[in-house]
Amino acid sequence: MTEAPYLTFELDIPGVSTGHLVVPRGADCEALSLPVFSCNRGEGPSLLITGGNHGNELEGPIVARRLIEWLPEAQTCGRVIIVPVLNPPAVEAWTRNTPIDGLNLNRTFPGRADGSVTERIADAVSRLLLPMADTIFDLHSFGPTWDFPPAVITHTIADADLMAKTLQIAEAFKLPMTLLWDYHDTIGMFDTLAHSQSKVFICAEFGSGTVGAEALAIYEAGARNALIALGLVEGEAEYPTFRQKKSSQTLETRSSDELKSPARGIFEPRCSVLDEVKQGDLIGVLHPMDSLSAVSINICTPTTSIVCAIKSGLHVEADEGVAMLARPLTSEVRLRIYRPEINWKGDHRPLASNGEYLRR
Ligand SMILES: [Zn+2]
């Protein structure tokens, strides 16, 4: 008989409480106990914060622990539930996927109670934690093979109201980059499940995955800003300092904006993230290593854009992504996202300076 997942404590208790989410044992491994923190201050928004969805992205679990130390004093209303590590076997092995069954937890939602360990984790989170929240922050990193600025990523959502609300909360982190990524490989993502239940889902992509003190301070400040914006904490949100600047920009990127390697070899980056590049500018060089007579190949940008991600220098296969380009999210594109019911052909109303058309 399949065992059901359970919580070792009552989430509705007022105040701070901690316990575990127990993922039942299966044929492939023993039961898992995921530590869970809850701070319940009554009426208000309900937020679920998760880290360690991918095991080699460790900024999220660290920032989650810092928020657990801060919230008991800071939180004034609503409910915050935090699970620093969603996938303990992957975090312990420092692997993106779960080493036991090879599955990517973020492609496994809503999971299966009688499935393998990754499916059982997804099932437990979907059934017992997701219903408790109207907003979810899932704390990721872009991965150790990429250079990536501190950022919040959202994907395009068909529901215009939910899209507007999601982008608003994403920008409230005030991180150096907010990226709207038109991304289609979304089956089984935690995001997709939350969106299907009309919940705001924010995927923080906290840098490249090489954990550093300065970057962690920026991520923590961003998460605090978002908690202030939600009204869970009182305070003034502030832009964290990144490269001596306090600023943020919202960009959009599509799958077609990814630059691919023309051959297999070692990729050498020649620019940095958030660099503005013109058509023909050098992004990086591919050095074929199979033959000394093979010449190195310059990889140049096809259009004026901003570099939002670049491989941090490693051996790549032909046609593997080496850089992602993006453009500022213009007010016209925002309008199309927020007001899809309008026939945009021939309708080029300018955005009012007070942002009037941004609200519905
Ligand atoms: Zn991730």
Image (cartoon, helix red, strand yellow):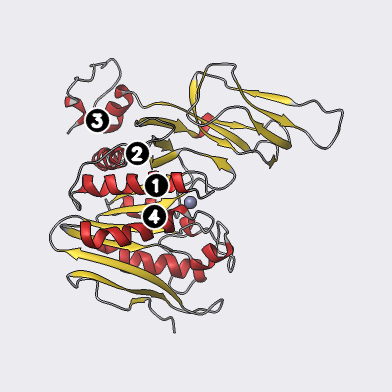
The answer to which of 182 and 22 lies nearer the viewer is 22
Q: Earlier in the sequence, mark 1 or mark 3?
A: 1
Residue under numbered circle 4 = 63
Query: How far is mark 4 from mark 2, CA to CA?
Result: 15 Å
Q: Earlier in the sequence, mark 4 or mark 1?
A: 4
The answer to which of 318 and 89 lies nearer the viewer is 89
Question: In the figure, residue 315 lies in which quadrant?
Answer: top right
Q: Nearer the viewer, mark 4 or mark 1?
A: 1
Residue in the picture at 30% in, 22% down? 332
Query: How far is mark 4 from mark 3, CA to CA?
Result: 35 Å
Residue under numbered circle 1 = 217
Find out whether the residues at labels 2 and 1 contact each other: C-beta distance under 8 Å. Answer: yes
Q: Earlier in the sequence, mark 3 or mark 2?
A: 2
Q: Nearer the viewer, mark 1 or mark 3?
A: 1
Residue under numbered circle 3 = 339
In this rendering, the answer to whether 269 lies above or below 135 is: above
